[in-house]
Image (spheres, helix red, strand yellow):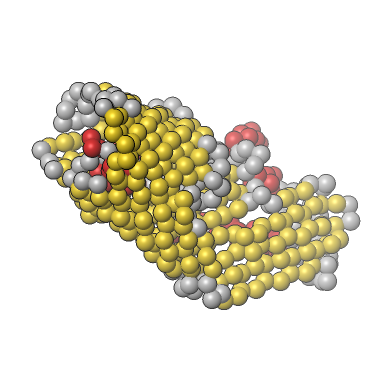
Amino acid sequence: MSAKKNCNDPQMKLGEDKMKLMNIFIVALLVIGIAVPNAVGGQSSSRAVAMGGAYTSLATGVDAARYNPANLGLTDYRATSIELVGVGANITNNSFSLSDYNKYSGAILTTDDKEYILGQIPTEGLKLSVEAEAAAMSVASGPFAFSVIGVGLANMNLSKDIFELIMNGNTYADTIDVTGSYSEALSYVSAGLSYGRPVYNSGSRQLAVGATFKYIRGLANEEVLELEGIASTETNGFFGEGNMVARTASGGTGFALDLGAALILNKDYTVGVNFSNIISKVNWTNNAQEFGYEFSFDTATIDNWSSDQIVSNDYTTDLTSYSTGLPSTMTIGFAKRSGKFHWSVDWEQGFSRTAGSSSKPRISAGVESTKLGFMPLRAGYSLGGDKSAAFSIGSGLYLSKFHIDYAVVSGSSLSGYSSKGLNLAVSTGLYF
């Protein structure tokens, strides 16, 4: 939607005021994607990432605090361990693979190229999910675990109409609608204390419950509260209106609570459920602001673009504070844990569409072989939610009490060129 006062083409794009709204939104997305190095739990657990995230009923020690604190109450799952460092990042989109990027980056696009690119973007728009986690010096012993984790999350969607405008411009009787686009991002540090205890024992069966209480130090938050915009080209000029309202902050404090339950069915199988951030609140108080922009134009043309046909307004308001919650999810897991070949399946359901969760369910499955002893082999597959389907692989090196694990995630095939993003994880620690 760009129109220039000195343009000689009467069907040029829509106007500087409309473009200003687009620029604000697009720049916000780019800033989020760059500034947030960015899953609510587990990106720093390389074993979990390698198994597709299916880890609820396998996690022990420090990992249990993230995936299901109830596992700390199971006698067979208790471990004394220290996670020295764990880092992971997951950046995905719903449209373009690495192969697409390599083919079209820097290329002069033909009409067929533009049609292919637009065809890759679903009707609901281009979605980008960014998740990252870094953990250091987390400790587990018996039924207790203490962990310090830094988390960054971003979730955004850009209307397909915007890409059609960029590729083809706008023509007569063309309508551009950015309604449905959204953006949200947050980053924080969590200090969590986890505890699990058995509540029932009968033969090989054991039922345990657990909880993790987390103190949250908010680092940054951005969310677009309202975003609407539409513009059309007609015989007697350009018509359009829209508005955006967003709020941001650079610090705050809060808390969150995870609850879980785990049941050892027999010596081979375990089932569990975890509610992550079932209760949470972060009060953002540092540099809290709300800002907005609105515009409208009626029968605007190249000749009258600077006159009263165009009305726009923007504002910035300082806020004392505002509150948000953390993404809340429920995960149910089932796993075979005995022997030298393990497998697990998880079903994750978010309670809302937000950064770090999706209201659409996601299913993941993973396998692990420990036949080589010092070098486990892992693989996984996941699909659903707001993310593309993905294969994952990983391994590790276990030497006496020291271990290092790593994992990578590809796309819908094992080829990295099918990947619609980047997902890597490395972790290291000690077992006693």
Residue at 48% from the left image edge and 67% from the top image edge: 283
> Up-down: is 218 above or below 92?
below
The quarter of the picture where residue 341 lies is: top left
Where does the image place residue 37, in percent across and percent down from the top left?
40, 54
Q: Quick check: can you spot residue 37?
A: no
Residue 297, given in percent of the width and then of the height, sits at: 80, 63
The single residue placed furthest to the left in the displayed view is 400
Residues 230 and 247: in front is: 247
Task: Locate the C terminus by quadrant.
Answer: top left
Q: Residue at x 75, y 54 (%)?
A: 230
Q: How many numbered tags mark residues here?
A: 0
Considering the image in quadrants, where does the N terminus appear? bottom right
Asked if residue 111 lies left or right of residue 95, the reply is right
**Picture coordinates of residue 275, whole percent (x, y):** 44, 45
Q: Residue at x 62, y 60 (%)?
A: 225
Q: Does 62 sit left or right of 5 as displayed?
A: left
- Where 238 sits versus 367, above or below? below
Residue 172 appears left or right of 29: right
Q: Residue at x 54, y 76 (%)?
A: 320
Residue 19 drawn at (x, y percent): 68, 60
Q: Quadrant of residue 426?
A: top left
Q: Residue furthest right?
A: 236
Whether residue 82 is visible, yes or no, is yes
Q: Looking at the image, which is closer to me, 108 or 432?
A: 432
Q: Which of these two is toward me, 33 or 3?
A: 33
Question: Looking at the image, is 139 positioned above or below residue 19?
Answer: above
- The front one of 35 and 431 is 431
